Amino acid sequence: MKKRYIIGVIISSFILLLLMTFVKNGSINYTTKPVAKATITQQVEASGSIKPINTVAVGTQVSGTVQKIYVDYNSTVKKGDLLAELDPSLFQANVDQSQAKLNNAKATLARTQAMLNYKKNNYQRYKHLYEKHYVSRDDVELAQANYLQARAELESANADVNATKAALENNLTNLRYSKITSPVDGTVISRAVDEGQTVAASFNTPTLFEIAKDLTKMQIETSVSEADIGKIKVGQEASYTLDGYQDKKFYGKVTQVRLASTTTNNVVTYTVIISVDNSEGFIIPGMTANVSIKVGEAKDVLCVENRAFKFSMDDTKKYEKQGVWVLTSSGPKRFNVEIGLSDDNKSQIISNEIKEGDKIIISSGSNKKKQQTKPMGRPF
């Protein structure tokens, strides 16, 4: 079926070449081409680069010196896999120091609790003795004050224990952060750190690795001018070529038209996302893609060459509508037409007056000049 189609295209092209003639009309020769039915596809051209759909930046929450790196570019990792490790000695020292402070705080708490129990019992004894008139009221009030002071000291000791526990947890967390692990399954596509390098955690976490979650499905981020963006819709078919595989054509679809614009040298563009199927695995992130987005198609419609719209027998400014010149039996005649879809070579015309086979004038020249033109042939 494909072979028949190719043969048909070759035959049709040959017939069209035969039909293009130079017709004499007085002293002027007109170059014409017949109106023919064809399928016309209108496309918007754009360029962009291949990018993974989901990329995770892996950084560090703590500062330190990179002691060991366990992965490199293109490494396949699972969630939780160790990517790199910072020197843990400082973090371990902080943990040990916090643990010692916690042990000391707990000991202080135990002593304070024992003292509280003693002073509470002492206060109770003084109250009992006071009721039997063995001690004075001042002695009771002093015992009560000592008891209340011990209770306050117990609360302070409890607070110290909680504070040292929090410090210990913080230092344990920092120790865990010294081991940098992968948050997702994927492939390492970028590594921005080497062993021995010092990394500093700040308000913006430094990125050490980039991991693409799934390289079998990627996307093209293209820039489309504001003149064409109104034609782009989600779901439209697109084809693209890659500089690395110039002899192969790939296919995808428009998955997103982003509303945010970018202005460069007074040119406004919008980002359009094209889906990429990389199930075969040979498309690499960062490749340049030349994209053609199909924004319209008309089958079996009347078409003329785009050159026909540039030809005119007189001043085109006096015509309010677009038109073409047809070579009729009585000479050239202009007809208004409505232009439908267009590609680089031809355009669809909509007209009740023009029919298939009509000779559309695309250029003209002097007959005398034609006669003086030396025919091409082998030089002697």
Image (tube, helix red, strand yellow):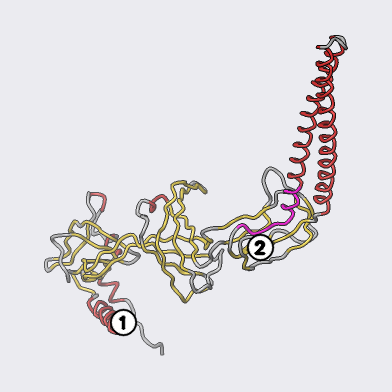
Nearer to the camera, 215 or 3? 215
Q: Is residue 248 above or below residue 141?
A: below
Please tell me which of labels 2 and 1 falls first in the chain.
1
Q: Residue furthest bottom?
A: 380
194 within the magenta span: no
Front one among 205 and 123: 123
Q: Look at 87% across and 13% down and name the residue there.
A: 139
Quadrant in the rendering for residue 249: bottom left
* Residue 4 screen position, x and y as percent: 27, 84
Q: Position of residue 309 (x, y in %)?
A: 27, 60
Q: Which residue is mark 1?
A: 2
* Quadrant assignment for the N terminus: bottom left
Residue numbers of the magenta segment: 172-183
Name the residue located 67 percent from the left edge and 58 percent from the top edge: 181
Q: What mark, if any, has residue 81 been given in the picture?
A: 2
Q: Amino acid at mark 1?
A: Lys
